[in-house]
Image (cartoon, rainbow, N blue to C red):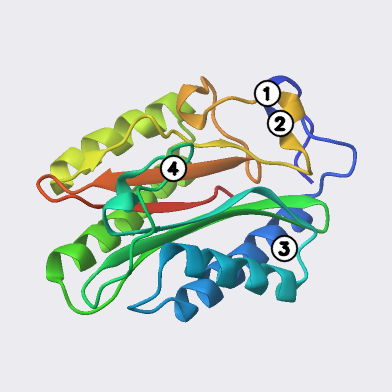
Amino acid sequence: MTPALGGKEAVGEHFALESMRYAQQMTWKAVEQIARGICPGMRESEALLMGKQVLAELGMDRIWHPLLIRFGANTLKMFKERSDGDPVLGDDDIFFVDMGVVWQGHEGDAGATFTTGSDPQMAACAAAAKELFDRVERLWRSEGVTGVALYDYAAAQAQAMGWKLNLDIKGHRVSDFPHAIYRGGDLGDFEASANPGLWILEIQLTHPELAYGAFYEDLLI
C-alpha cells in the first residue's frame, strides 16, 4: 500500500496499491476488447453503446467518468468537449477509446488510439502518443522529477518528434473511489514527485497539419 501522504496525494481508508493495479489491468482489458469491436461503417454512438455493454459484461462496479470514443477529427477534442456530429468510421481512419471505471472500489483510467486501414500518417500519430507516454514514464521511473517537470519534458519531446502536445490536458489523480474529494489537481501542476498508483499520465497529440490527433493515458505505478 502507498502511504497516505495527505494533501494532493491523500487516499481513503480502503486504498490498496494491489487494487489499483487490478483496476488498471481490468480497464486495459476493457479498452482492448472495445477497440476490437470497433470497425469501419460504425458510428461513434454505436461504438459507445457497444462499449457500455462490454463494461457491464466485464462486471465493473460503476463508471466514474464517461466512456469516450472519438472518431476522426473528434480525436482533437478534449474530455469536456462534445463530439461534432456522429461520424462514421472510415476504412482508413483513426479513433481512440478513453474510460474511467471503478473495479473493486478503485478507479481505473486508461486510453489508447487505434487506426483502421493503412494510412501511414495516422498510424504514426497513434504510435507517437504511446512512444511519448513511454518516454515520460521512463523519466518518472528513473529520476522521480516533479509533475511539472514531466510535462515540460513531454512538451519538448513532442516538439522534437514533430508533434504538438495539448498542454490543456496534464494528467490527474485517481484513488479508491471517489478520488475527487481529495482535490489533487493536475499532474502537470504537481510540484513534487508523483507516488506510484495515484496519478494518471495523459498524452494528447495533434497532427501538425491534418485534422486529427492521438491520445494515450495510463496509471503511473
Determine the CA span between mark 3 and mark 4: 30 Å
Which mark is first along the chain, 4 or 3?
Answer: 3
Determine the CA span between mark 1 and mark 3: 23 Å
Determine the CA span between mark 4 and mark 1: 24 Å
Measured as percent of width and height from the top left, residue 12 is found at 84, 36
Is 79 or 89 nearer to us in this picture? 89
The residue at the point 34 percent across, 61 percent down is: 87
Q: Is residue 185 above or below residue 54?
A: above
SS state under label 3: helix
Q: Is residue 47 above or below residue 203?
A: below
Find residue 180 and name its label. 2
Discs 3, 4 touching: Cβ within 8 Å:
no
Q: Name which residue type carries label 3.
A: Tyr
The residue at the point 79 percent across, 46 percent down is: 1
Determine the CA span between mark 4 and mark 2: 22 Å
SS state under label 1: loop
Is residue 200 among what the camera can see?
A: yes
Find residue 22 and name its label. 3
Determine the CA span between mark 1 and mark 2: 6 Å
> Label 2: few (<14), some or many (≥20) within 10 Å?
few
Which mark is first along the chain, 2 or 4?
Answer: 4
The residue at the point 71 percent across, 31 percent down is: 180
SS state under label 2: helix
Is residue 146 among what the camera can see?
A: no
Measured as percent of width and height from the top left, residue 211 is found at 18, 50
Discs 1, 2 touching: Cβ within 8 Å:
yes
| Front: mark 1 or 3 | 1
| Front: mark 4 or 2 | 4
Q: Name which residue type carries label 1.
A: Arg
